[in-house]
Amino acid sequence: MKKLPTNIPLFPLTGAILMPKGHLPLSIFEPRYLEMVEMANDGNKMIGMIQPQKTNFSAPSQNSAVLSVPNQDSHLYKFGCAGLITGIEKNNDGRYSIVLTGVKRFEIVEELLVERTFRKARVSYLNYKNDGVQKFDEKSRLREKFMDKISQYFKHINVNVDMQYFDNLEDEELINSLAMVCPFDSAEKQLIIEIIALEERTQIMIKIMDFNLNQHAMVSENKVH
């Protein structure tokens, strides 16, 4: 890929993160984000996914009960991920269905003056220069430990997954893809996206799953008594 742009449009969305090598399908319907998608698709096809720090949940979201688009003046987290539009389709009702493929995480250096209805920022990729090429140490059993834990976690949340699907994924794609799809809360997802090293990110995900599993065990035990 060519050099990543330092000025990118921002798509703030609570409850959703994009990670390098991950694929995020989105339904775009708000006029400002329709404009953003059209501009990006006509240009370098790059959009920055980022979470707002505070979101007004009073208005119903049309993406899901979890995801919510913030007000224009909401404060944003400093760290997100640049995604490349790798799929786009315009629906009969004027919406766009797009797929963003994660390229590299970024830190917002400064928000730019609003020239359009959507927000833009100058970003730096320096902290995440190794995104896309991270692997576990060959002697590490961390991948095996992670897969055991996420199997327990999926069973706990009643999600049926063919675990063999993940066998052929490289380490980074495996961890990042599962970080995106696991129903962690927005603060947990933000913690995950900010962690630079793959090993540390994996350990944090294991701790989050352990916490959820232990909470469930304590609730079940209290019900018995």
Image (tube, rainbow, N blue to C red):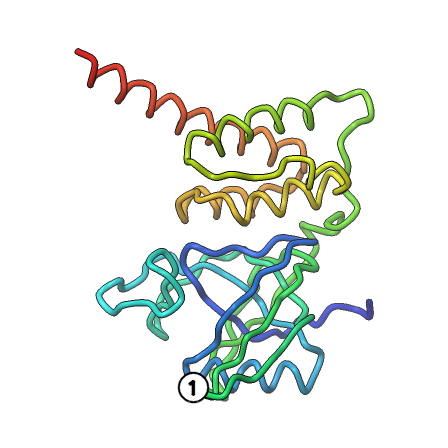
Q: Residue 76's spot in the image, x, y percent?
A: 43, 62
Up-down relation of residue 19 to residue 214 (above or below): below
Residue 84, by quadrant, is bottom right
Q: Which of these two is toward me, 112 or 195? A: 195
94 w.r.t. 6: above or below: below
Within 10 Å of the Cα at label 1, are there few (<14), some (14-19), or many (20+) other Cα atoms?
few
Q: Position of residue 52 (x, y in %)?
A: 40, 60
Position of residue 204 relative to residue 169, above or below, is: above
Element type where label 1 sits in the image: helix
Question: Where the C terminus falls, by quadrant?
Answer: top left
Q: Residue at x 51, y 87 (%)?
A: 35
Q: Quadrant of residue 179?
A: top right
* Count of numbered circles in the view: 1
Q: Residue at x 55, y 25 (%)?
A: 149
The vertical placement of 44 against 70, above or below, is below
**Residue drawn at point x = 47 percent, y = 56 percent:** 16
Q: Would you name the residue on which mark 1 appears?
A: 31
Q: Amino acid at mark 1?
A: Pro
In the image, is 109 to the left or to the right of 33? right
Which residue sits furthest left? 225
Q: Residue furthest top?
A: 225
Residue at 44% across, 63% down:
13
Q: Residue 164 location in percent, x, y? A: 69, 36
In this rendering, would 173 be left or right of 216?
Answer: right
- Residue 151 rendering spot, x and y as whole percentages: 55, 29
Q: Nearer the viewer, residue 143 or 80?
A: 143
Q: Quadrant of the N terminus?
A: bottom right
